[in-house]
Image (tube, rainbow, N blue to C red):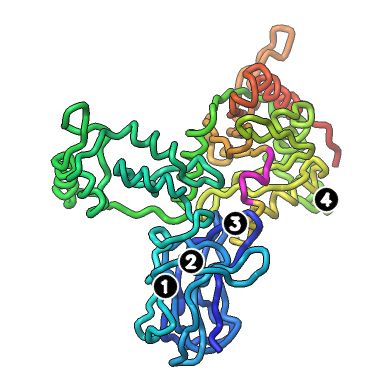
Amino acid sequence: MATTIIMPKQGQSVESCIITEIRKKVGDKVSVGDVLFAYETDKASFEEEAKVEGTVLACYFKEGDEVPCLTDVMVIGAEGEEIIGKGQQVNKSTGQQAGEIASGVPSAKQPVDSLTCGLVDPITSSLSSEQAFASPRARRVAEEKGIDWRRLAGSGPEGRVIEQDVTRAAHTQGALSGKARAMMAAEGLEAPAKGSGLAGNVKAADLSAGLKAEVSQSGAAYDDVPMTNMRKLIARAMYNSLQNSAQLTHHLGADARRMQALRKQAKKAYEEGRIDANITINDFVCYAVIKALRQFPHVNSHQLGESLRIFKKVNLGLAVDTERGLMVPTVPGADDLDIVSLSKALKKVADDCKKGSINPDLLSPEAASFTVSNLGNYGVEIFTPIINVPQSAILGVNTIVPRPKDLGGGVYAFVPYIGLSLTYDHRSIDGGEATRFLKTIATEIENLDITF
């Protein structure tokens, strides 16, 4: 009997995954343990292994497709065996299959050799509104106005594109003539913000002019390289953050002499085996941030539009640079940890991200209540971090640079200062509170009371 392979659900927050590579095509022989396909969630990657042996009879998706979790991806069975039923999605509560998900999935009467990977396009297939990434009304309005909703950052639940997103995009684009709309649909062109027609209407000639300009430069010294799936996800999140929050950044420096002295003590204690963690400057900063968040609970929050969710625990997010892109894993309950335990926890989530084995639930923006992003190791002296919405704030940590300081008695000297950049959502936090919070972080850094 044929066995259906479904898209696994990796974590409670993951609703869909992107197929990055299909290892077994229709007609290929499969043994137990063979990798059938590779896929990724928001930022973690996985491989699906075969649990049975046989022949791949059908593959309903192609590489690059975004597939709802618990949806049929492949069918494995005996060579020549008929496939009973169509691609289905498993009911999330019962685990049983329920309803067809795509009208383009081949039926049982089709011969096996006619089934090939990529028959179903999950974007254009008739998915239910729960599975879709744009509401039916948004799709309808987008078609009427000639807007490609796939290019929009959704403001609906879980990033879904809704009608107001399409309407907002339409305001920045001139009205389309019938011929221009047809050209965009047929050739996948993008309309300019303003056309040459009356009142800025976009005509077919405007699209043709842009197309000719692109073709004429095709021999120029550049390459148009498609963004990776990871880059698309990061771009969508960053655009959504700036589009849906009132962000402002304050910058401040903190005397780093005490922290640098503690770093030397911690390194010596680690080398002598008195502690089992090689505590870094970033660990000390995170420890100071946690102590400051205890004093400013409103900063340790999520902005939910009409309400503010204030967390009783500090769930600390840490921006991690990996080969696949920026990831922000969370250390839940970080305020319960001492400096050694915190250092080990931060190192573990960072290593898991780099290895691709991080729990996807820890990468959800909702998992963290506050995030720290450190670019100090790269020599960055000042930057403006972007909030990981729905969080209310994020701290950027800069490199340590010498600055003059009044040591008292008319004596000035250059001392090491670490730069701190706090970006906050002005809807959640007032400027005065943000300034006091940032100053408290600096004070905690300058007065760290830790012994090794």
Residue 182 or residue 10, whichever sits in front = 182
Q: Nearer the viewer, mark 4 or mark 3?
A: 3
The residue at which mark 3 appears reads as: 14
Q: Is residue 367 magenta?
A: yes
Q: Residue at x 49, y 79 (%)?
A: 85
Q: Secondary structure at mark 4?
A: loop
Q: Which residues are magenta?
A: 363-369
Label 1 vs label 2: CA separation?
Answer: 8 Å
Circle 2 sits on which residue? Answer: 101
Of badges 2 and 4, nearer the viewer stands 2
Residue in view at x 59 percent, y 61 percent: 356
Q: Amino acid at mark 4?
A: Ile
Q: Main secondary structure of the magenta part?
A: loop
Are dots 2 and 4 in contact, CB under 8 Å?
Answer: no
Look at the image and tell me in which quarter the C terminus lies: top right
Residue 106, quarter of picture: bottom left
The local secondary structure at tag 1 comes to loop
Q: Residues within 10 Å of mark 4 (few under 14, many from 20)?
A: some
Where is residue 184 shown, x and y percent of the image?
A: 24, 48
